[in-house]
Image: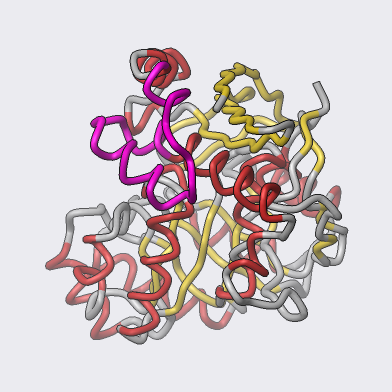
């Protein structure tokens, strides 16, 4: 098996701001795994919150390059177990696991959703994310990208004012993501008004470790609560039951499609709604997420829509949210450059 690593700096259409950071570009690692003329592609972005850089991922993957290239690849799960045994970060494992799944599907001549026994006849529509900005700029972003569902990033001193103003300009469904910025009492108060403003659910309202606050909030919240920073890896799914109504799985954080499939199964057993979210990824990462669509209640896979220029072909998302699945097998990815 041949391994190739590529670095790209993805340029965003607009400065992307959440409660704890802003950026205009996004470093991303693309992994390429090849066997018998077939190549699978995976992706993981850098992330300052988790202290992940392109260089840190490259260093730990290069350290086991020979073992990866000599690995007797049969299916992605065994390869994932091997990567975990090597102590790589979840972000590095994700990039390799996504490539392994894409490669496996191409070798089997089937898209991944079909290999997993699901149909793409029905699927949830992705939201389009409106990052924090001046209210005027946030309105401009909505007008530039008309969409049926918006996820609005919050975490300011005037969060309700933002949502009230945005509501004047669209009848679209709203979701809000506080990225850990609120306190429990504040969130309880916000819930009531946000529901009146047509908000569907609130994502990660409190700090990831504020379980006492979440217990209080869960009892009084009039909107569903979705865990993000509180649900990173498989072990967190059980913990979130009783505190949240659903979980948002990020492939980079949990270490790829292999654990994500298990997290989806476990969440459904616990009666939790399931969402898969993205980072600011190219179509490489987004196409992997799209293979999970038939299994999801909600999805946030707008990362490539936020870019000035994409680096790959694969899943295509139309302006009404319709997903066009590629003819390629696996995740359906082809690099453009």
In front: 43, or 332? 332
Q: Is residue 98 above or below residue 220?
A: above
As drawn, is 196 to the left or to the right of 13? left
Residue 89 image position (x, y, % from top left): 31, 32
In front: 138, or 292? 292
Quadrant housing the N terminus: top right
Q: Is residue 117 above or below residue 203?
A: below
Asked which colour scheme the image uses, the reply is secondary structure
Quadrant housing the C terminus: top right
- The residue that appears at 36% across and 86% down in the rendered structure is 271
Q: Main SS of the magenta segment?
A: helix
- The residue that appears at 61% across and 40% down in the rendered structure is 133
- The residue that appears at 84% across and 59% down in the rendered structure is 146
Give residue 184's quadrant in the image. bottom left
Please say whether residue 115 is one of the residues in the magenta stretch. Answer: no
Q: Which residues are magenta?
A: 66-93
């Amino acid at each position: 098996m041949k391994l190739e690593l590529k670095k790209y700096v993805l340029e965003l259409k607009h400065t992307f701001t959440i409660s704890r950071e802003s950026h205009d570009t996004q470093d991303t690692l693309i992994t390429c795994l090849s066997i018998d003329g077939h190549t699978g592609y995976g992706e993981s972005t850098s992330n300052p919150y988790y202290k992940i850089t392109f260089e840190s991922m490259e260093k730990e993957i290069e350290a086991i390059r020979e073992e990866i290239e000599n690995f007797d690849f049969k299916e992605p799960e065994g390869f994932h177990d091997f990567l975990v045994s090597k102590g790589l970060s979840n972000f590095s494992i994700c990039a390799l696991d996504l490539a392994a799944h894409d490669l496996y599907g191409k070798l089997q001549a089937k898209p991944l959703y079909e290999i997993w026994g699901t149909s793409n006849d029905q699927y949830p529509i992705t939201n389009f994310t409106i990052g924090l900005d001046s209210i005027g700029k946030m309105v401009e972003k909505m007008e530039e990208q008309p969409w049926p569902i918006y996820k609005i990033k919050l975490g300011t001193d005037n969060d309700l004012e933002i949502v009230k103003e945005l509501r004047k300009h669209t009848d679209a469904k709203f979701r809000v993501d506080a990225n850990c910025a609120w306190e429990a009492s504040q969130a309880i108060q916000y819930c009531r008004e946000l529901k009146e403003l047509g908000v569907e659910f609130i994502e990660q309202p409190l700090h990831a470790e504020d379980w006492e606050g979440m217990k209080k909030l869960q009892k009084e919240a009039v909107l569903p609560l979705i865990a993000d920073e509180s649900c990173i890896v498989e072990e967190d799914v059980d913990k979130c039951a009783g505190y949240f109504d659903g979980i948002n799985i990020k492939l980079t954080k949990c270490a790829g499609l292999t654990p994500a499939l298990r997290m989806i199964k476990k969440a459904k057993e616990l009666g939790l709604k399931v969402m898969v979210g993205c980072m600011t990824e190219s179509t490489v990462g987004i196409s992997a997420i799209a293979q999970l669509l038939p299994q999801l209640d909600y999805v946030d896979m707008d990362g490539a829509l936020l870019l000035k220029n994409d680096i790959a072909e694969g899943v295509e998302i139309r302006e009404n949210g319709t997903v066009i699945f590629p003819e390629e097998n696996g995740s359906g990815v082809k690099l453009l450059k």
